[in-house]
Image (cartoon, rainbow, N blue to C red):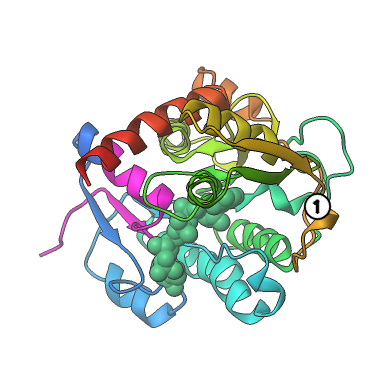
Amino acid sequence: MKDFAQVLIAGAKGQLGFEFQKLFSQKGITFVATDIDELDITSETAISHFIKNKCFEYIINCAAYNDVDGAEKDAHSCYLLNSIAPQLLASCAKKIDAIFVTYSTDFVFDGRKNSPYTEDDVPNPLSVYGKSKLEGEKRVFETYQKAFVIRTSWLFGIGGKNFNAQVLEWSKKTNELKIVDDQISVPTYAKDLALFSWLLVQTKKYGLYHISNGGEASKFDQAKYLLEKVGWNGKVLPAKTHEFNVAAKRPSYSKLNSTKCEQAVGQKIPHWQSGIDRWVDEWKKINSKA
Ligand SMILES: NC(=O)c1ccc[n+]([C@@H]2O[C@H](COP(=O)([O-])OP(=O)(O)OC[C@H]3O[C@@H](n4cnc5c(N)ncnc54)[C@H](OP(=O)(O)O)[C@@H]3O)[C@@H](O)[C@H]2O)c1
């Protein structure tokens, strides 16, 4: 007797995984939500054992090694999770003929371009994290064609580690914040990423896609907008990347062009400021209950 659920989510306790769970619950889509305790995606044996006798139509990988600076010192863990694990999952998806979905990053680019990056632009990652994600992309497509690899940028959701949550924490401890204005990309709301990923997956137009919210922003723009929105009384000052001691190099410009996805699904992805507005509303609701 085979168990039945349409979707397997790996890394389901993370920002994106959490939004997929909410989306599927709303849509009445059956799913199995797993994180490292239920399914360690770096273990081929664990994956094979887990999918045995199950007939998922989709496997969605939301798990990743996301510590961009930590990866410079621990490349092994980073490659295991970002390069090898997506390949293992793609291979299992192939065995059961499930559609496979996994995620990559704007950090596969070096930032030398000054207009939004398309899927046809040549990647040149500057960090171990970016290199591991690019390697993961290649391994997935070498393994399985019924796959979507979706690059996104500067993700923020509810309940996870992200820049919005970090800025709000900092703002409790000081009246003056210095935030870099020389890194530009697009903050992306995990809720929008989950929805547009799902719309895209339904098209069955497999391949590489970019999905980020509309517009572009520096980290300074993002922090300023967020802090104004929550009514913070302090001051946000622009700073430069070289003023901070971080291990990994980041692209100075890595806005993704999401037109290929928008054309495939026939809908525009909302602007990042709309994403922050909705994130703040949700954050306030959660914090008023706490
Ligand atoms: N966050 C960003 O700014 C950003 C930017 C560009 C692209 N992306 C990509 O977007 C995707 C979703 O990111 P996210 O921010 O939602 O990630 P996240 O919040 O860090 O969630 C990842 C989840 O995977 C879990 N996990 C770690 N190792 C695992 C393993 N071996 N097996 C199964 N699960 C494991 C994590 O558990 P623990 O928390 O216990 O480790 C966590 O619950 C990722 O592919 C990420 O690289 C993110």
Q: Is residue 96 left or right of residue 249?
A: left
Q: Is residue 191 left or right of residue 173?
A: left
Q: Nearer the viewer, residue 248 or 145?
A: 248
Q: Which residues are magenta?
A: 1-23
Q: Nearer the viewer, residue 211 or 153?
A: 153
Question: Is residue 273 among what the camera can see?
Answer: yes
Task: Check disc 1: other Cα within 10 Å, few if <14, some if 14-19, many if 20+.
Answer: some
Which residue is the site of mark 1? 241
The image quarter containing residue 97 is bottom left
The residue located at (68%, 67%) in the rendering is 69
Q: x, y (%) of residue 282?
A: 33, 34
Q: x, y (%) of residue 161?
A: 47, 56
Q: Is residue 231 left or right of residue 108?
A: left
The residue located at (50%, 49%) in the rendering is 146
Number of marks in the rendered image: 1
Q: Nearer the viewer, residue 212 or 96?
A: 212
Question: Is residue 102 among what the camera can see?
Answer: no
The image quarter containing residue 14 is bottom left
Q: Judge whether 43 appears above or below 258 on screen.
A: below
The residue located at (41%, 27%) in the rendering is 278
Residue at far right of view: 112
Is disc 1 placed on a helix, strand or loop? helix
Q: Amino acid at mark 1?
A: Thr
Q: x, y (%) of residue 162?
A: 51, 51
Q: Quadrant of the N terminus?
A: bottom left
The residue located at (47%, 28%) in the rendering is 231
